[in-house]
Amino acid sequence: MINQLSRGERLYFWLAGLTAALVLLLIILGAVVRVTDAESGCGGTWPLCDGSPWPSGSNELAWIDWAHRLNTLFTVLSIFGACYAARRFIRDRKDVTTPLYLGLGLLGIQSVLGAGTMLLHEPSTLPLVHLGFAVIMLSCLVASITALLYQPHTHIFYSDKFSTAVQGATLMIFMVLMTGALVVGSESSKVCPTWPLCRDTASEAAIINLIHRGSVLLLGITLLSLVWQVDRSYDQVSFTGAVVLLALYGLQVALGALYILSDFHASLSALHVTTAGLMWAAAVALNVVLVKQQQVVEQG
């Protein structure tokens, strides 16, 4: 697919892909900051770290917090580069450029929310909204890249039922991401040191945990149904997308269980969030594929 792009389109692809990777890293580092309680590593100041452009000394939490901020700067530079390439080479591809420009606007809002999280002493709802904007921004970039790369065949099978199932699975993945962030943000993880059940079911923290685990279970049922519905003989892309989603789901569940059973090791939390982010990106890409398929069917 990439070889079929023009030189300008390839430049845009690499810049947009870099930006998407940086946004995913932004989400991962944000999760690590929350898990390690590194939010005040830079003394609660923004954008400087204790009045300095970078941390001084060997304060590990300050370096984690600073890495998250530095990654934000790289993301800003990368998305502006992608916007330049879009304006220069593919301005007529509205299906590609519109999600990109929306992502640029969301990055501005997300940066303001990140600063507010630090300056307002991290109110409980602000980090969750901060993550939500980052997740939607990632979806914008993935949608733009998928629209650039995927061109459906003239004669292709399209199922409204399967498309609706994919949309439902995507909403469930978003719910899993948000409830997982709520578990970490409310420091509810350690209330349930067992898996898959929780010994304590009466406290508010345990209820938050159980809501997250329940949403994960519902997502698994949804993805199994998704794979069951699609037939590889109709469309290989849709079948592959559904199988990839199910595989990522299985890996994410395994990492989540290991994170709990390993006494909440931060590295496993980072891998858990990484897999969830990849699953979200795959779901968004599959949605874009189905939209383009529907357009071809309607035009035909």
Image: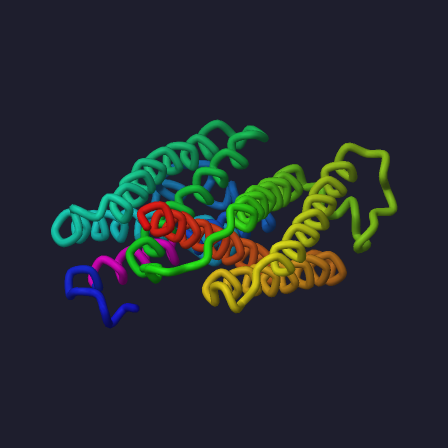
Residue 57 spot, x, y in % from top left: 44, 56
Evaluate whether residue 284 shows in this view: yes
Query: Compared with residue 139, is residue 275 higher up or lower down, i.e. above or below?
Result: below
Which residue does the image show at 21% across and 48% down from the upper left? 93
Magenta stretch prevailing secondary structure? helix
Q: Nearer the viewer, residue 234 or 282?
A: 234
Determine the residue located farthest toward the left in the rendered image: 88
Residue 206 spot, x, y in % from top left: 78, 39
Residue 291 spot, x, y in % from top left: 40, 48
Quarter-of-image position of residue 276: bottom right
- In the picture, measured across the screen, residue 277 lies left or right of residue 206, that is left
- In the picture, measured across the screen, residue 274 lies left or right of residue 258, that is left
Does residue 17 belong to the magenta stretch? yes
Determine the residue located farthest toward the front in the rendered image: 300
Magenta residues span: 11-22
Query: Compared with residue 260, is residue 198 higher up or lower down, i.e. above or below?
Result: above
Q: Nearer the viewer, residue 160 or 210?
A: 160
Does residue 84 belong to the magenta stretch? no
Residue 112 spot, x, y in % from top left: 37, 33
Q: Nearer the viewer, residue 190 or 4?
A: 4
Which residue does the image show at 52% across and 68% down from the upper left? 233
Query: Compared with residue 150, is residue 104 higher up or lower down, i.e. above or below?
Result: above
- In the picture, measured across the screen, residue 171 lies left or right of residue 293, that is right
The image quadrant where one finds the N terminus is bottom left
Which residue does the image show at 37% across and 60% down from the upper left? 155
